[in-house]
Image: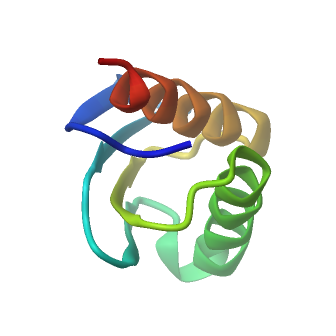
Amino acid sequence: MTIRHKATAGTMQSSDAMITVEPSDSLEILIESTVRKQFEPLIREQVEATLARLGVTTGRIHISDRGALDYALSARVETAIQRAHQE
């Protein structure tokens, strides 16, 4: 799946995440989180697994996390990617 334009998914509420994706020539994942010190590697792993499953190899992915669980992160990333892929 290709990121064709900028798109977002999610909210900034507690236990959720706001995901913003936009086109880029390389894959860049930026993580901003209230629990970054403890969980950044796990957040990155979850996002990378979701991107791999969707076949996304390039794009700028910005995660503003407020303590979202892994399934919420995956759902938000997938929704943002689907929105960015649409014409």
Q: Residue at x 57, y 56 (%)?
A: 56
Estimate the x, y position of residue 6 in percent, counting from the top left.
20, 38
Q: Position of residue 64 (x, y in %)?
A: 34, 50
Locate residue 12 relative to residue 45 in the image: left or right: left
- Does residue 36 appear in this view? yes
Question: Compared with residue 22, is residue 40 higher up or lower down, i.e. above or below?
Answer: below
* Quadrant in the picture for the N terminus: top right
Q: Residue at x 32, y 46 (%)?
A: 21
- For residue 9, side relative to residue 46 (left or right): left
Quadrant location of residue 7?
Answer: top left
Q: Quadrant of residue 13?
A: top left
Coordinates of residue 35 in the picture (x, y in percent): 52, 64
Residue 13 in sight in this render: no
Q: Quadrant of residue 24?
A: bottom left
In the displayed structure, 58 sits above or below 2; it is below
> x, y (%) of residue 44?
62, 71
